[in-house]
Amino acid sequence: MVGQPIASVRVGAKRLGELAEKYGAAAFVTAMDSFMDFGEASALAELKNLPKGTFELSEEQDDGRIYNVKITITDDEFLVDLRDNPDQDDGPTNTSRDGTLICAQMVFKSITDSNTPANDGSFRPMKVLTREGSVFHAQEPAAIGFYFETEVRVYDLIWRCLAPHIPDRLPAGHFASICGTFIGGIHPDTGRQYTVIEPQIGGWGAWDGRDGNPCIFSGFHGETYNTPAEISEARNGLFVDKMALNTEPGGEGQYTGGRGLVLEYRVRADNGFLTAGYTRSKVKPWALKDGFEGSGNYLEVIKPDDSEERFSFVSGLATQKDDVIRVVTSCGAGYGNPKTRDPKAVEMDVKNGLVTPENAREIYGWEGN
């Protein structure tokens, strides 16, 4: 994995050198400056269409901490203030300022001009303030093993703060977690060590006029992908017993949140391990306009005797043969009062098994059988 980015940067440097040699250094620099200026102009043009003022949000996290953001928007600046946040902690849920900056850049690009290329000029109107020694600007020797879960929290915090003010550009809350799942042990067929390192897919929030998308990656995600069941079973010491939509209650609205995932791994040998980190478990995806919040992310370990234990964060949990590790990702949040949902859409939801007839009658006021 490390070699690929290094090689790509070397190839990119070679190509840029060739362009400078072909057209001359002066022309190359002028073209690059023009490209950056175009990025800035595109961002400023869209910034003028956003609501102006200062917007604030304080949100409780699954672990009880409070995260805060203050966003000030003017015609020529987009200021994100994250200084009023908890100190870095002794656990692995800290992140760097660089990671925090990228979170803000992603939201900013999404709500300004997402159709043009992103370059340094695109982010000239944006400023991000952090406090050294905080969870969003950790200093050595802070651990950052689960930095990605903290970064997706920053991303979603900014998103949630702005969504009520620009609902045409930002939907209701999605499952908003990387749901990093690490399952390992000794392969019973080869005797070799295996480790599954897999993010999970989940439901996205609804928009005005549109249901949320089911089972896609979170808005803040990297270059890792989910693995087809056949490949996972061939390479790893487990079976994939189930992969289905999550149909538990959550995400109801005039427009419904997309469905999350239910994925069951059955371990084939003793002395394995499970490590995972899920957020948006207790504090669930947030709704808009009287919709219902999402269902929440979690995982369960089910023993052969049918006893089970539920987790959101777990490290080095011992697993044994025939243990089932059930991954459940959240449905996205709903938009609008469920009572105003189109009855034909409710009927289709019931027909497709996405909602029970009982819940359809109670939540949506459905009059079918």
Image (cartoon, rainbow, N blue to C red):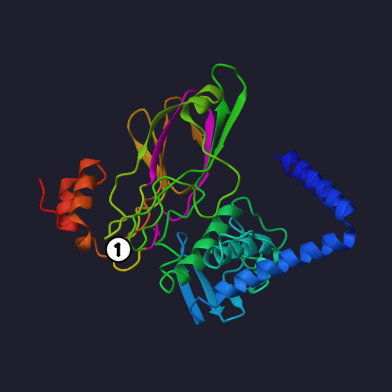
- Quadrant hosting residue 351: top left
User: The disc labelled 1 sits on which kind of residue?
Assistant: Gly
Tell which residue pokes out farthest to the front in this image.
Answer: 23
Give the residue drawn at x 47%, y 71%. Answer: 162
Task: Report the label total.
Answer: 1
- Residue 16 position in % (x across, y down): 82, 51
Q: Is residue 269 magenta?
A: yes
User: In the displayed structure, does residue 183 sit left or right of residue 168?
Assistant: right
- Between residue 120 and residue 115, name the one nearer to us: 115
Q: Closer to the camera, 141 or 2?
A: 2
Residue drawn at (33%, 29%) of the image: 305
Name the residue carrying label 1.
291
Of all residues, the one furthest to the top in this rendering is 189
Q: Is residue 129 visible?
A: no
Seen from the viewer's position, the closer of residues 352 and 326 is: 352
* Secondary element at tag 1: loop
Q: Is residue 146 left or right of residue 345?
A: right
* Above or below, comparing residue 48 to residue 279 in the picture: below
Q: Position of residue 320 (x, y in %)?
A: 47, 28
Image quadrant where one finds the N terminus: top right
Q: Give the magenta part as a residue range.
A: 260-286
Q: Residues within 10 Å of mark 1 (few under 14, many from 20)?
A: many
Q: Answer above or below: position of 55 versus 300.
A: below
Give the x, y percent position of residue 153: 52, 60
| Residue 175 drawn in magenta | no
Q: Is residue 98 visible?
A: yes
Is residue 105 toward the left or the right of residue 324 in the image? right
Residue at position x 51%, y 55% in the image: 219
| Left or right position of 16 against 168 | right
Q: Quadrant of residue 365?
A: bottom left
Residue 109: percent from left, percent from top: 58, 64
